[in-house]
Amino acid sequence: MLSDPAIAELLQNLAKLYVQRLPEETRLLERLTQELIDSGPELAQLETLRHQLHGIAGSAGTFGFQEITDQTRTVEQQVRALIKAGHPTDATQVLVQSLLQLIEQLKQAAFADMATDSLVADVPRYHARQPLLWLVEDDALQAAEIIGVLEQFGYVIRWFEAFTDAEQAAAADERPDGLILDLVFTRERINAAERLTRHSPLVRLGVPVIFISATDSFQARLTAVRMGALGYMLKPLDIPRLVDRLEAVLEQDRPVAYRVLIVEDDLLQGQHYAAVLSASGMVVETLNEPTQIMDRLSDFRPDLVLMDIHMPECSGADLAGLIRTYDEWLSLPVIYLSAETDLDQQLMAMGRGGDDFITKPISDTRLVASVRVRAARFRKLDSLMARDGLTGLLKHSRIKEALEVEIARAERNAIPLSVVMLDLDHFKQVNDTYGHAAGDQVIRAMAHMLRQRLRKSDLIGRYGGEEFIIILPDTTAQVATRVIEETLERFKALRFTADPGEFQVTFSAGVASTADQILPASLLNMADKALYQAKSAGRSRVQRFIPEGNTND
Ligand SMILES: Nc1nc2c(ncn2[C@@H]2O[C@H](COP(=O)(O)OP(=O)(O)OP(=O)(O)O)[C@@H](O)[C@H]2O)c(=O)[nH]1
């Protein structure tokens, strides 16, 4: 992910490159205008002129020249009218005048000292980082325990012994992603909690609050809810359950790294959109070669495609139609991003397989918002179909599909791929002793911990009841084994609370990697074999499958 100064610099450089290419565009327009003056309006030349104007209208605004876009659109309309009329009219003279005016404007723009800062000022920013939580808890021992466990799950905690300390930090403009507040029902403590949750700057920012308390009553919970509680956890604290609640609460607030594929033949514009969307936290790829679309879709698996309409080799509408011939991509949102303002043309393009139309140029903020709204809807629907309800992990069929995609990618790019099969130990006993609900809680905690500890590019699936598959692209067997061993260390330290008391759970895992000369197609079987070995050797361990005679380490 690019940092803000890098984005600003990139956008500035792209705008400079655009300005550099203006003289050439202007010369072409001058030549076409001269031809129009010399030989009158001929259909083929008018079409070329219209095409050239269309390109300028779409790109100028993107790089900060909105007036040029407006003027070009007017001229484009005049050309369209002439084409429609089919013969020279008085309008030819008016068109020539407008063209000369536009050419002047373009020449001036080429010398303009661009205030490119304005281009990036409104790009919504996003920094990937671990969520920061504030914990207000006067019991140092309890605080240490909570911090220890939450850190295992990848949270960063700032501890305050008293509400007033947290209030001071809030007044100093610090902003956590969430608050965990210990609530004791004395007048003084409630007043302090109220000051933080109802009157500090954090309220305006909508920071989510979870209370922890030893008191359980209707009145206590009501007081907490009135202070904006999104969770109320009872002491003694079941910390994995607290993590469960935190995940749910913070999820609503988290910028999602939507994946966007931009298909655009104008390299500069493609890069500009990519920079703007990346700056808002999205993962973006651009494609200038339409024939490679299907490979890129399988490789990159976007949430949304932004498609230019007018491309030399193959139109965006044709490309959208082609994508829809594959069942797998029927529901993928395809949004046309085009300078086309003609409603009939837009409708025609939509009929071919596009879902929506965004007219170029578009402001950076609106582009981000439009893409985000549409990608979010697709993710939601896709997630309902693909994800397991208890854990939010990929379902059996989806993780197997994902494995096929990753195998193909690893082979194509000659990079290692590791697969882990993981199974909770003696889980039947957990259910039998503590009940099914406690068992579910353990499964969820396992899922949270995997999500927090693994990279975003790793894929995690719930393969069966208490069995998980993890796919680690570009990862050797040693690294995969180490990561899962570290996860085991942390997982087995977790304490779950249920009737009749606290308990801990372990897991066993098998690792198989192409780096150990295992054929990609056998990875799953070999990881399963290794898991079996780990169970037979006494459980609570990670076993790496090494084929006989392999000394690779
Ligand atoms: N609570 C809960 N239990 C589940 C779920 N899915 C499967 N299980 C239980 O998981 C247990 C799996 O038990 P076994 O396959 O015998 O294995 P185990 O007891 O974990 O023993 P080992 O794997 O040999 O260590 C069964 O009791 C299932 O009912 C679920 O979604 N929730």
Image (cartoon, rainbow, N blue to C red):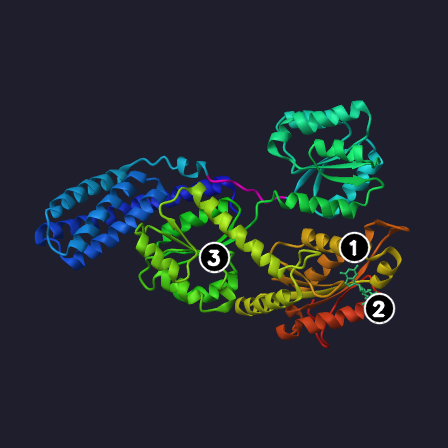
Outermost left residue: 38
Can residue 407 be spotted in the picture? yes
Query: Any atom of ligand 1 within 8 Å of the CB at mark 2?
Result: no
For residue 250: magenta? no
Between the residue at mark 2 and the residue at mark 3, the CA separation in whole angstroms equals 49 Å
The mark found on residue 406 in the picture is none
In this picture, which residue range is highlighted in magenta?
Answer: 123-129
Task: Give coordinates of residue 366: x percent, y percent.
Answer: 44, 43
Q: Nearer the viewer, residue 153 or 353?
A: 353
Local SS, label 3:
loop
Residue to which mark 1 is pinned? 442
**Residue at left 63%, top 54%?**
455
Amino acid residing under circle 3: Pro
Q: Is mark 1 within 8 Å of ligand 1?
A: yes
Q: Residue 537 has which mark?
A: 2
Which is closer to the viewer, label 2 or label 3?
3
- Image-based side of 236 in relation to 94, left or right: right
The answer to which of 516 and 74 lies nearer the viewer is: 74
Instruction: Considering the whole magenta stretch, tell me its main secondary structure.
Output: loop
> What kind of element bears circle 1?
helix
